Amino acid sequence: MLIRIGYDLTFEFPSPTAMTLMLYVHPERAGDLVAPEKLIVEPEAPIQDFTDVFGNRAAKIVAPAGALRIRSESRVRDDGLLDAQNPSAQQQPVAELPAEVLQYLMASRYCEVDRLGIIAWDLFGKTDPGWARAKAICNWCQANLKFGYAFARPTKTAWETYVERTAVCRDFMHLAITFCRCLNIPARYATGYLGDIGVPPSPDPMDFSAFFEVYLDGRWWPMDARHNIPRLGRVLIARGRDATDVALTTSFGPSRLVKFAVVTEEVAS
Amino acid sequence: MLIRIGYDLTFEFPSPTAMTLMLYVHPERAGDLVAPEKLIVEPEAPIQDFTDVFGNRAAKIVAPAGALRIRSESRVRDDGLLDAQNPSAQQQPVAELPAEVLQYLMASRYCEVDRLGIIAWDLFGKTDPGWARAKAICNWCQANLKFGYAFARPTKTAWETYVERTAVCRDFMHLAITFCRCLNIPARYATGYLGDIGVPPSPDPMDFSAFFEVYLDGRWWPMDARHNIPRLGRVLIARGRDATDVALTTSFGPSRLVKFAVVTEEVAS
Amino acid sequence: MLIRIGYDLTFEFPSPTAMTLMLYVHPERAGDLVAPEKLIVEPEAPIQDFTDVFGNRAAKIVAPAGALRIRSESRVRDDGLLDAQNPSAQQQPVAELPAEVLQYLMASRYCEVDRLGIIAWDLFGKTDPGWARAKAICNWCQANLKFGYAFARPTKTAWETYVERTAVCRDFMHLAITFCRCLNIPARYATGYLGDIGVPPSPDPMDFSAFFEVYLDGRWWPMDARHNIPRLGRVLIARGRDATDVALTTSFGPSRLVKFAVVTEEVAS
Amino acid sequence: MLIRIGYDLTFEFPSPTAMTLMLYVHPERAGDLVAPEKLIVEPEAPIQDFTDVFGNRAAKIVAPAGALRIRSESRVRDDGLLDAQNPSAQQQPVAELPAEVLQYLMASRYCEVDRLGIIAWDLFGKTDPGWARAKAICNWCQANLKFGYAFARPTKTAWETYVERTAVCRDFMHLAITFCRCLNIPARYATGYLGDIGVPPSPDPMDFSAFFEVYLDGRWWPMDARHNIPRLGRVLIARGRDATDVALTTSFGPSRLVKFAVVTEEVAS
C-alpha cells in the first residue's frame, strides 16, 4: 500500500533563531519513499542535514526574523501489516544487553526511573517478565490515565503523570517507558506518522503519533500505552530516550507556533 | 608527574544483580597509564568490558548474592598543568555546532533546561557570551549555593537546587550545566580523580571528583562550579549528559554500599 | 449603586456526595444585601449553613447521585468607590502583629514560603518595605507571568508558577501572596464578585474574581497581581490562606462540573 | 506519675529578628503542671504570650543580634495511661462534621490531598472505614517508609515522601495525615514530649515528638505512623494542619540553631 505523508508548519520568530528539525522519515524507512523527501522552508534558508546520536535524520536551519513556513509532502510504501506482536518474547538479563541498548534503562528528563522504582515493582512485580509485563504496563496506563489535551504541559514528567493521572499521548508513553525501565526492560520513545487506516480509525488523525518501543528477545517492538492495540501504517520518524530527544522542532530562542497541519492517508498506488 | 589512583568499594546484594561500572580511566587518558588498569572483584565474577554511547569505557558484571568488593589501583602520568583557561573563547552559533555536540544543549534527568530558561536569561543575559558567561554562571553557583553533604539526595535536580540553594558537588555541576544549556552553551557532566596536589589542597581528598565541560571555540573546557579555580592532576573517568550517565556504579536491583575508599596522590616517579 | 450578583452551577455525581459551598456573600457585606441571599439547590436537599474558621459563611449539603443544580441571585448595595489605596501604608514589625494575622505569614498548600524566600529577597529586597514592596510584587507578577486558561491546573503552586511563568488569576495571587509572606507582609487569598463596571471593563466578566489582601498599617488592603489596578464593585465572598480554603465548592468524592455561569452587573436602583 | 520536661536551645542571629515560639505545654495540659511554666531567654528580652488560631499557647519575642538561649524546665502530672485505643471508632459523614473539624480535611503545605487522592483510594479503599482504615494507613507507613535523619529536609512533603519512601517522624505523620484526609478522615499534626517511659523505651529520647490525631466518633485520637504503638507519657504542646503551624520556633529572618537539648523523664513524685 501507499501512504501520503506530510506537514505544514508556520512559526513566528522575533529575531533570527537556530532550529533543529526532526521531521524526516527515519533512515530505516527511507528506502520505502517513492521519491526523496524534500523539506521546503519559506522564506528560503539554508538547510543543513545531519544524523543525530540516536541515528535519526535531522536538519538545522537558522530561521530569519518573522514568519517561517516549513512543509513537506511525500509518498511512502508500506507493507500494510499490523505492528508485530510476540506474547512469548522474553526479557534479556541486563548483563547480556548490548551497550547501545543499556542507555534505554536509564532515567531521562521526562522519565524519572529513580523516583518510580518502588511503585513499578508494587504494581507489576507479580506479572510475568517480558512481553506480558510490558503489556501489563500498557494496560494499566490505558485504564488509569485520563486523556485530554487540556492536561498537556511541556514540563510534565512520568512522575507527575502518575500522580495527576491525566495525560496526552506523550505522557502515556513517558510513564510506560519509565515503568519498563524500572523493571529492567529497555524502552525508548518514538515519533512517526500513523494514518487513519484500517479498523479502528486513528483516534487523532491530523497529528504526528507518539509511541514507544521495548527491547525483548534481542529486538525492539512497538507499543502504544494509550491506544494499546496493534496498528498498521506506522511510519517512523525518530527515536530517543524521551520526547526531549525527538521533538519535531527545537528552537534555540523564543518562537511561536502559528500553524500546524499534518497529513497521513492511504492513497491509490 | 606520576599520580597513584585507585578505589576500594564493597557492596551487599540480597540476590544476584547486574551492575555496570564506570570506573575505568577514560580512553583519552588510557595512554598515560603506567600499566593497564586491572579491575579486581571478590568473589571473582566475569567482567565484560564495553564502550558506552558517550565513548566511556565501562564494565558489566553480575554481582553474586552477598558482599562484593571492587577495587583497583593504577599509576598514571600527568603533565602537571592546570586546567586550560581561555577567557576569550567564543560561543559558537547553535547552527554551527557538530551533531555530536547538540545533545549537550538538551534537557536531561537532572538538568531541566525547559524549566530554567527564563531564570537563566534573567541572571546571565547581560554578561558577554562565551567564556565570560560560563564563568559568570560558575561564580553565581559558588556564591549562592551552600555546600553540605546533608543536602545530598539521589533525586535532586538543577531546578530543586536553584530553589533550595543547597548542594553537593554534583548539584553545583547540574545547575551550572543547566544554565549553560539554557544560554545555548553546550555543557556536559564529567567524573574523574582529582588529587590533593598543588595549592590549594583538594577540599575533598579521598573522593571522586565531579566537574563539567563547556564547548567553546570548537573544543571542550573543564569547569568546576563549586571550587571554581583551575586545578592540576585531573584524571578523567567518564562524561555524559548528567550524573545519570556516568554513575560510578549502577545496580539493576537492590544493593547497599558498605565501604567506599578512593585514593589519588602524587607519587615519586 | 446596586449590583446584581448570582451564579448557576450544575454538577454530576456518581453517588451521594458531601459538599461544602463557599458561595455566600461574606458576613462583612451581608448588611448591603437588598434581601437575604437564598441558595437554591435542585433537586431539593437540606442545606446546613456554618461559619468556617476564617469567618466565612459557608454551607454543607449532601448532593444526591445524578445532577445537582446550585443557583442564587441577589442584589447588593455598593458605595461605588475604587479599592482603597495608601502608598504610604507601613509594614508592621512581625512581633507587633495580632495573633490572628500571624497565620498569614506561614506557608500553605499553594504558597511555598519555605521555597521562595531567597528568590523573594533577591527580587524585592531593595524596594521600600510596606505598600511599595507589595506593589512591586504585583508589578513583577503582572510583567512576568503570561496569562492563559490553558495554563490552569488544580495542583499548580506559587513555586511552579514562578518557574513556568504562566498563570491564571489564582496563580498570580498565589505567587504574589507567597512573595509578600517571604518578606514578612501578611497576605491572604480572597474570592468575590467583580462586576463589569467602570473603566476599564472587567477582563473576565462572567466569572468569580480572585484577589488578595495585604496587612499594612493595622488593616487589610485588597490587591490584584494580575490586573494590578484599583477596581470598583468588588463584593467579597471569602478569605483564607490560599485557594484551598475558599474553593467555591469542595466535593468529598468524585464529581463533574457541567455548567458554570456567574452574573455580576450594575442595575438601576 | 510525674514527668520532668524541658529544653535548652541556642540560636545565633545576624541581626534582631522576630520569632514565634510554640514551646509551651498545651492549654489542655496546663492544669497538670506542678508549677506554671517559665520560659527563660538569655539575654533577657520581652516575651509576649498569645494564643494562636488553633488554640495553642505561643510566645513572640524579638531576638537580639548574637546568641539567644531559650530554656525551660517543668514537672507535669500524668495519669500514666497508654494512648486511648478504640478499634470500633466510626468515621462520621463529612456533612456531620463540626465546622472547626472540616479544615482538617483540606490540603496544607506538606499534605497534598489534591495529589494523593487516587493513590489513597487504591491503597486503602477496601479497608473498613473508621479506626481500621486509619490503622491500615499507619501500618502501611511503618512498613513502607525507611526512617533516617539523613532523609530530612525542610521542604519535604507527603507526596515526595510517598515516592521517595524515606522519612523522618514528621514525614511519616504528613503522609499518614494526607492519606486520612483523602479518605475523608479529619487528621491533624501534633507535637509534644514523649518520655523514655514504659516498655518499649522511646526510640528517640532527647527529642520532641511528632504524632497525629484522627477524628472518629466525635473526638480526636492520637496515632503515630512511625512507631505505631500506643504510648504513655505523652505531653501535648501544639496542634495544627501540619508542621508549618506548630514549628517549635519560627524565625522571621536568618538564624542558626547551635544547640538543641530536650529532657523528658519520669521523676519521683
Image (cartoon, coloured by chain):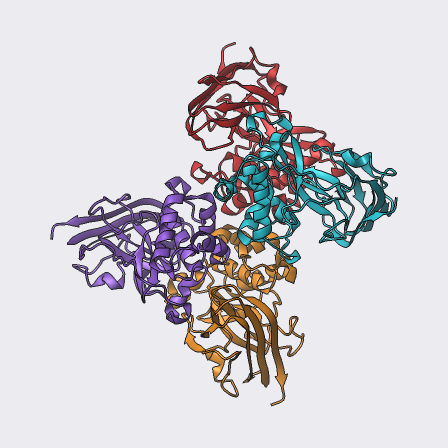
Chain colours: A cyan, B red, C orange, D purple
Q: Quadrant of the N terminus of chain C?
A: bottom right
Q: Which residue is drawn at 40% across and 70% down?
A: C53
Q: Is residue A191 left or right of residue A173?
A: right
Residue B91 can be seen in this image: yes
Q: In this view, does C101 lie to the left or right of A181?
A: left
Q: Where is residue A18 in the image (x, y as percent from the top left)?
A: 76, 42
Q: Is residue C40 left or right of residue D246?
A: right
Extreme top residue here?
A: B269
Q: Where is residue D65 in the image (x, y as percent from the top left)?
A: 37, 51
Q: In this view, does D264 lie to the left or right of C35?
A: left
Q: Is residue B86 above or below residue D150?
A: above
Residue D46 can be seen in this image: no
Q: In this view, does D76 lie above or below B200?
A: below
* In the foreground, D258 or C234: C234
Q: Is residue B104 above or below residue D253?
A: above
Q: Quadrant of the C terminus of chain C?
A: bottom right
Q: Which residue is drawn at 29% across and 47% down?
A: D207
Q: How many numbered marks are there?
A: 0
* In the foreground, B174 or B121: B174
Q: Where is residue D261 in the image (x, y as percent from the top left)?
A: 27, 45
Extreme bottom residue here?
A: C269
